Image (cartoon, rainbow, N blue to C red):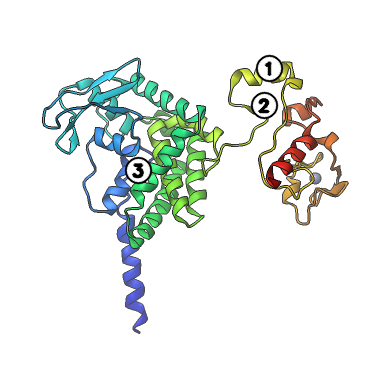
Amino acid sequence: MEYIPEVEKYMSEREKLEQLITHPELRFGYVCELYYSLLGRPVPKQLDLLHTWFPGMIITLEESDGSTKITPVYNDTERCIHAVKYHEYIYSGGNNRVTQITGRLIGTSSSNLEKERKTAELIQKNISRRIIKEMDPILDLQENTAEILSELSEEEIQDFHYLLYMYVLRTADHYNETEEYFRDTELYPYDDEVLEQILYNALYQLLKYDFDGMVNAYLWLLLGSLLRNECGRITRTYDSSFIPLHRNPGESSNFLDKFWYLIAPEDFESVYTGDDLDQRFPGIEWFCDNCHDHLNEQPGFDDHLPEWQCRKCGYVNVLDSSAIYDNEEDYHNDIQRKDDLEEAVQRRKEEVKK
Ligand SMILES: [Zn+2]
């Protein structure tokens, strides 16, 4: 009998947390709101909000005495807003254009339909380019997010984890249930695959049940909601932990690399960066030539065997470097560009030994 009230108390606390999810939608303002409402604090004003979670990326703080109101200005070529602190906060008054741009980025106000839409998109493009070009910006963002979240108490961390988890599930549900027509015509529509990948990455990280996972999950939600479809480049460049995805040159994010690889594959060297070195063909995914089932996942699969009988259809697949293709298109056209896979693995083994 004593047991029941405790369960109820526990339930109601969880329910209370879930009530903090006001909108199960991927918009920057709503994603930020989760953090501030957990702490019972007001959500900072637009410029402060952008500066807190994306320092140095959208707003450049200028030197000032801190007690003079200086109107913020947007610089088109730099794609950034110059502003100053007024007392503790960034001064945001006096420039309608800046208000329109930030409103668009934060995405929760319905009043600025088209105005400065293009400018906001240019800012989004600029940020995502910087993030895929080199590792530093994403590492800085990771560090910044971790720093902010590390101020939470043990209990708040658990609550925030639960809150994010429910938010991701409910947002996925919301998009799933919204008819295509409304999804495509909403205020800031997402490409389905971009939205799905962002939510997937966030959930993947949350299910690691550790602090780093929570940081990564929240950063995916912040990035995804701020950059909208421009986040697609980032999901294609990094895995859910923000580790660069290994790509052969044919899948490189650099368009010209892709081009030159088609023309002169011999100029490119295969590189293996993973750690599955006990496998004969690390990093290679095998698919049944007959039914296309993913063989690596079949029980008992071992790529040291000379061949593998598909557990699904019975077809005998040869496991040999002659059966390895860069991608499905090459497989269908029977084009093999590279045969230096074993050397790449050998180099990696030596690298790991050091
Ligand atoms: Zn098969």
Tell me whether circle 1 and circle 3 mark residues in contact (CB < 8 Å).
no
Determine if the C-beta at disc 3 is less than 8 A from ligand 1: no
* Corner quadrant of residue 334: top right
- Looking at this view, is 292 or 177 the one in front? 292
* Corner quadrant of residue 68: top left
The amino acid at mark 2 is Pro
Which numbered dot is residue 31?
3
Q: Is residue 101 left or right of residue 207?
A: left
Tell me whether circle 2 and circle 1 mark residues in contact (CB < 8 Å).
yes
Q: CA distance from mark 2 to mark 1?
A: 9 Å
Determine if the C-beta at disc 2 is less than 8 A from ligand 1: no
Element type at marker 3? helix
Report which residue position mark 2 lands on.
Answer: 249
- Density class for disc 3 (Cα within 10 Å; few <14, some 14-19, many ≥20) is many
Q: CA distance from mark 2 to mark 3?
A: 36 Å
Q: Depth-wise, is mark 1 or mark 3 nearer the camera?
A: 1
Residue ID at (67%, 46%) = 275
Q: CA distance from mark 1 to mark 3?
A: 41 Å
Q: Is residue 298 left or right of residue 146?
A: right
Ligand 1 occupies quarter: top right
Measured as percent of width and height from the top left, residue 109 is found at 26, 33
Tell me whether circle 2 and circle 3 mark residues in contact (CB < 8 Å).
no
- Density class for disc 1 (Cα within 10 Å; few <14, some 14-19, many ≥20) is some
Measured as percent of width and height from the top left, residue 208 is found at 51, 55
Report which residue position mark 1 lands on.
Answer: 260
Residue ID at (36%, 73%) = 7
